[in-house]
Amino acid sequence: MKIAIIVPMEIEAEYYHKYFHSGSKEMFGSTLFEHFCVNHNDIYIGLSGIGKVQAAMNLASLLSKVDIDLIFMTGSAGSLQAKVHKEDLILANAFAYHDAHNTLAGDYVEGQIPGEPAVFKLDSPARKRFATFLEQQNVKFQEGLIVTGDSFIGSEAQKEAIKANFATALGVEMEGAAFAQVAAHFNKPLVAMRAISDNGDNDANEDFDHFAQKVGAKAAKLICAYLEEMN
């Protein structure tokens, strides 16, 4: 299989660089991807950059050149719910844009871009297999909606505005829905795992760098363990 692993920032990719060795490098679009072979699988690891445009551009550049079979997206997110705590893992089963407001343009709902679904659902067999793997490893995780926008969420006011439209959303970040949209158009399965780095409140800015690195490593270890078991 050809498997892509994409994270937004270098500090979230550090563990992968320690784990994989002797890879080649290749540019796809504006992103440098490292290519490794693990358990007879071709692994492509790259940084998406931060934000929706970077995420969509760099994933599309890879998928346009390589017939990827499975996409893993890892990284961090801010919590939107009291039951979602720092370092918790969220295995997204859907993504939506919290900053798309097009209800005045036609028969659309909040978060919907004209011509696209309101929510990008992740329900592939590949995602279900990974969820089963986490359960077998006794890894605690939550499943649910994650919302995406181009702003760093760092106040209760911002959180409440998002929850007014997406009451059940577990987390908020800056790339996931763009990944899901591109993956859907290329008809590729996406497994998206976010680890909570902050509470998305007034302390988010102070917490972010430290926890992004820590929870990024946590997610990476699980992805690498799963790849070792794949046939």
Image (tube, rainbow, N blue to C red):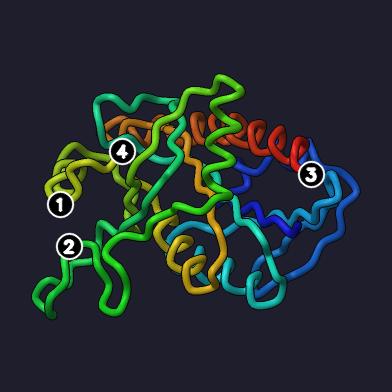
Instruction: Tell me how far mark 2 sits from mark 1, CA to CA.
Output: 7 Å
Q: Decide: few, some or many residues near mark 3? Use Cα within 10 Å; few <14, some 14-19, many ≥20.
A: few
Q: Position of residue 175 (x, y in %)?
A: 44, 56
Residue highlighted by disc 2: 110
Residue highlighted by disc 3: 231
At x 32%, y 31%, the residue is 199
Query: In the picture, residue 200 is in which quadrant?
Result: top left
Amino acid type indicated by mark 2: Glu
Residue highlighted by disc 4: 170
Amino acid type indicated by mark 4: Leu
- In the rendered image, the quadrant that contains the C terminus is top right
Task: Assess whether mark 1 and mark 2 are in contact (beta carbons under 8 angstroms).
Answer: yes
Instruction: Tell me how far mark 3 sits from mark 1, CA to CA.
Output: 42 Å
Amino acid type indicated by mark 3: Asn
At x 16%, y 71%, the residue is 108
Asked whether, in this view, residue 25 is left or right of residue 32, the answer is right
Instruction: Tell me how far mark 3 sits from mark 2, CA to CA.
Output: 41 Å
At x 69%, y 36%, the residue is 226
Asked whether, in this view, residue 35 is left or right of residue 135, the answer is right
Outermost front residue: 125
Query: In the picture, residue 11 is in which quadrant?
Result: top right
Q: Of marks 4 and 3, which one's residue comes earlier in the chain?
A: 4
Q: Determine whether the residue tagged by mark 4 lies in a helix, strand or loop.
A: loop
Task: Assess whether mark 2 and mark 4 are in contact (beta carbons under 8 angstroms).
Answer: no
Camera-nearest residue between 144 and 218: 144
Camera-nearest residue between 163 and 183: 183
User: In the image, which is nearer the foreground, mark 3 or mark 1?
Assistant: 3
At x 86%, y 50%, the residue is 40
